[in-house]
């Protein structure tokens, strides 16, 4: 736990100090909402369209952070420093995934109210939507960390991350959109059928966390 | 099925339950352990990058407590050899044993008992000197009271006053001094030093000497281009030719400075 706390604490401290990821993510998400607002020429969205706009903004903002997740480890020798220590590689995976989830939670704390102001008539479904977004965050973080560490040593990192990650995220985004859709319908949320999609989201998260746990040491080794 | 397979592969590959890793972390935190009889034993080591062999059939032994100087021209594979010993690179073939741990299979047992100072300082530029050392201390599972050791190390290299300064704001020599502290923070049994005095002026080199110099129970492998200093400092010498083959492996007093220079093809 000491190494996990050290890596997570280091990442959060560096982010607080440099503000390299979260402000860019928030700006990206808010700009996306502005573009949708005027692009669609709609002052209110509901159901699947609302879910799609929100999740697309979160997804592409997350890609920004995932691209940068291992930049300091690669450029400043963090990978080597961690491999030299008696630390299991999965500790790095877990710490990076938690750091990414924290970034996404901060992003959503900013983006969801902005989204609601721009597009929603009522805010009744937002509490339940928070639960969906937490599962989405874990679903973005688990494969995101794997792909980011694979791409970290490539010069085409910015290209590789979306190329490898987006296909992996399709099932998760389908489940998330279906889970969020009834929560964002005009006239108040409905919870019918949400449970099934939340279960699929949770299963997706567990599968990718297990895959990460199983393969991450192989990825770290030379 | 697939995930069970992944899980099985993971455990059969490294054979190290998490509890055992925690035990190694604790073990690495224990100071003043005595070195094993053969700190490093290398036999028939080859390391290739793609088609290119960087190390060719390298064999040598470094007894516990001794110092090995690794000499050779640029491209001879000195840094690659050190990185193999540090568990950062896997041997392509041959056997490598470090602190009685066979690499790469038991790399996790050796890690934490090795101090590595390479060309890169392995410090985060957006953390302060003290934060970097605290981060390292936690990676190695050192107890929290080792804050005193961090202060003491920074004091020894005269970086106490800059302890709270970001690494990105320091000169190369200052960064190297902090990197020395990082490498020795966990009191390793085996020190792997790749030109440790680079970027250091004579005064700074003297400051770090007690930290990286010869000490009872500590084995050292030292890459240097300063032939005279390397021969004077070392008990054993491993000289590599360009291309990674061994030119000389034996006692330091069995090789003259002139012969050592000849390995460089006449270049000092």
Image: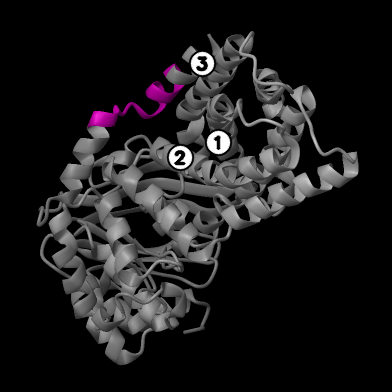
Give the distance between the C-alpha atoms of the residues marked 1 and 3, in whole angstroms. 19 Å
Disc number placed over residue A141 in the picture, else none: 1
User: Which of the two discs, 1 and 3, sits closer to the camera?
Assistant: 1
Q: CA distance from mark 1 to mark 2?
A: 8 Å
Q: Residues within 10 Å of mark 2 (few under 14, many from 20)?
A: many
Q: Please, which colouring scheme is shown?
A: one colour
Magenta stretch, residue numbers: B8-19
Which residue is label 3 attached to? Answer: B3
Q: Residues under labels 2 and 3: Cα distance? A: 22 Å
Residues at circles 1 and 2 in contact by the CB criterion of under 8 Å: yes
- Which chain is mark 1 on? A
Disc number placed over residue B142 in the picture, else none: none
Residue B37, given in percent of the width and then of the height, sits at 15, 50
- Up-down: is B160 above or below A209? below
Pick the front one: A125 or A137 = A125
Q: Which residue is mark 2?
A: A98
Front-most of A104 and B108? A104
Q: Position of residue B127 (x, y in %)?
A: 40, 66
């Amino acid at each position: 736990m000491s190494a996990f706390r050290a890596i997570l604490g280091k990442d959060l401290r560096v982010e607080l100090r440099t503000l390299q990821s979260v402000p860019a993510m928030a700006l990206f998400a808010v700009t996306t909402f502005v573009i949708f607002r005027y692009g669609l020429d709609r002052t209110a969205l509901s159901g699947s369209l609302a879910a799609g706009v929100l999740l697309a903004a979160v997804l592409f903002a997350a890609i920004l952070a995932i691209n940068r997740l291992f930049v300091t480890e690669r450029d400043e020798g963090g990978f080597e420093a961690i491999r030299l220590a008696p630390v299991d590689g999965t500790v790095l995976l877990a710490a990076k995934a938690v750091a990414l989830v924290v970034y996404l939670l901060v992003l959503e704390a900013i983006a969801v109210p902005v989204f609601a102001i721009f597009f929603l008539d009522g805010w009744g479904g937002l509490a339940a939507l928070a639960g969906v977004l937490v599962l989405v965050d874990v679903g973005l973080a688990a494969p995101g960390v794997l792909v980011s560490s694979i791409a970290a040593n490539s010069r085409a990192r910015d290209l590789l991350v979306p190329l490898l990650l987006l296909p992996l995220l399709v099932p998760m985004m389908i489940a998330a959109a279906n889970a969020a859709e009834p929560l964002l319908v005009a006239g108040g949320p409905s919870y019918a059928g949400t449970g099934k999609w939340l279960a699929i989201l949770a299963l997706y998260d567990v599968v990718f966390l297990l895959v990460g746990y199983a393969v991450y040491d192989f990825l770290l080794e030379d | 099925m697939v995930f069970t397979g992944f899980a099985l592969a993971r455990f059969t590959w490294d054979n190290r339950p998490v509890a055992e890793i925690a035990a190694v972390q604790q073990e690495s935190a224990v100071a003043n352990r005595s070195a094993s009889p053969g700190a490093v034993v290398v036999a028939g080591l080859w390391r290739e990058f793609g088609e290119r062999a960087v190390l060719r059939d390298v064999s040598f032994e470094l007894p516990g407590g001794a110092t090995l100087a690794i000499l050779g021209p640029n491209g001879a594979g000195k840094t690659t050899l050190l990185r193999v010993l540090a568990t950062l690179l896997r041997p392509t073939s041959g056997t490598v044993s470090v602190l009685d741990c066979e690499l790469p299979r038991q790399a996790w047992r050796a890690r934490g008992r090795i101090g590595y100072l390479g060309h890169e300082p392995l410090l985060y530029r957006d953390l302060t000197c003290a934060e970097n050392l605290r981060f390292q201390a936690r990676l190695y599972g050192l107890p929290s009271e080792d804050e005193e050791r961090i202060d003491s190390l920074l004091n020894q290299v005269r970086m106490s006053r800059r302890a709270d300064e970001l690494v990105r704001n320091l000169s190369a020599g200052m960064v190297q001094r902090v990197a020395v502290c990082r490498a020795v923070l966990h009191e390793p049994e085996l020190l792997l030093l790749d030109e440790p005095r680079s970027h250091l002026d004579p005064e700074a080199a003297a400051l770090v000497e007690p930290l990286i110099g010869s000490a009872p129970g500590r084995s050292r492998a030292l890459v240097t281009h300063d032939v005279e200093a390397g021969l004077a400092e070392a008990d054993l010498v491993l000289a590599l030719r360009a291309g990674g083959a061994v030119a000389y492996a034996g006692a330091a007093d069995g090789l003259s400075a002139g012969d050592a220079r000849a390995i460089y093809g006449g270049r000092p």
